[in-house]
Amino acid sequence: MIDAAAGPSAAVTPAQSLDAVLALYERWGVDPYDEDLSQLDHALQTAALASAAGADDALVAAALLHDVGHLLDLEARGPVGRLPGTDLGHEATGARYLSRLFAPAVTGPIALHVRAKRYRCAVDGDYHARLSDGSRRSLQLQGGPLAEPEVVAFAANPRFQASVDLRAWDDEGKVDGLGAAPLDHYRPLLARLVRL
C-alpha cells in the first residue's frame, strides 16, 4: 500500500497476492472518484472493451487493473482525504503495486496509460474534446499534451501500441449504467497471469 501521510511520490509495497488486489476493488470499487460511475464499473467496462477487441489476456488484465493506483490512494487516505489539485501518479503507483504479481505485459500499459492520453492530445486535435470532464481536469495536472520530442520518444516505446489501445478503452469505459461481466469473471484470467 502507500503511506497515507506521503505525497505523490509515496513508496508502494507491492501486492502479495491476487486476493489482496481484488480486495481493493471490493472495498473501494463503489467509489465514484472523478467520473459518473464507480471505479469498479469503469474497470469492468474497460476490460470488457479490451476483451471484445480481441486483446490478449495480459492487455485485458491491464485494462481491468489500470486504475488500481486510485484505489490504493483511497485505501491510504479514504474518500475525504484526497489531495485536490494534485496528481498522485496513479499510473506509476498502480504499476509498482502490481509488479510483483504480473509481468511487464500487464504493468507496462498501466504505467503508460496517462502518457498515452497526453500523446493522443498532442497528435489528435479532436481528442481533447472527446475526453470526459474528469480526464480533462486531470490532464492539466498530468502535464498536458506531450511536447514534440516526447511524442517521438513515446511512439518508439515497445509498449506504445498496447498503452494507446488501453487508453482508448479507458476513455470509452465510462458509460453510466452499461452492464459488464462481474469482477469474478476475470479471476481465472488474472490467476493464469500471476507469476508467483
Image (cartoon, grey):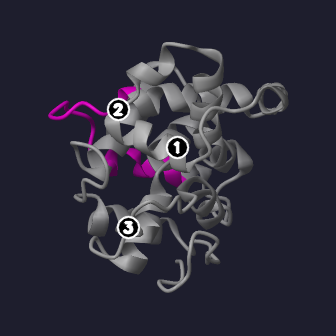
The CA span between labels 2 and 1 is 13 Å
Q: Residues within 10 Å of mark 1 (few under 14, many from 20)?
A: few
Any magenta on residue 188?
A: yes
Q: Where is mark 3, residue-wise?
A: 24
In this orientation, which residue lies closer to the viewer: 16 or 187? 16
| Residue identifier under label 1 | 140
Which amino acid type corresponds to the residue marked 1 in the rendered image? Gln
User: How far apart, in angstroms, are the residues tagged by discs 1 and 3?
Assistant: 27 Å
Q: Position of residue 33 (x, y in %)?
A: 30, 55
For the residue marked with disc 2, what is the amino acid?
Ser
Does residue 172 appear to the left or right of 79 in the view shown? right
**Lateral position of residue 165 relative to residue 4, left or right:** right
Q: Secondary structure at mark 1?
A: helix
Which residue is situated farthest in the left direction here? 177
Quadrant where the image shows the C terminus? bottom right
Crowd class of label 3 (few under 14; some 14 to 19; many from 20; radius 10 Å): some
Residue 37 on image: x %, y %: 22, 44
Left or right: 180 in relation to 123: left
For label 2, the residue is 132
Q: Name the quadrant containing residue 153.
A: top right
Between discs 1 and 3, the one toward the N terminus: 3
Q: Nearer the viewer, residue 196 or 140?
A: 140
Position of residue 100 measured from the top left corner of the image (x, y, whole percent): 67, 66
- Do we see residue 145 in this rendering? yes
Residue 111 is inside the magenta segment:
no
Quarter of the image where one finds residue 7 = bottom right
Residues shaded magenta: 172-191
Give the secondary structure at mark 2: loop
Residue 59 is situated, as x and y percent measured from the top left of the image, at 58, 36
Q: Quadrant of residue 102?
A: bottom right
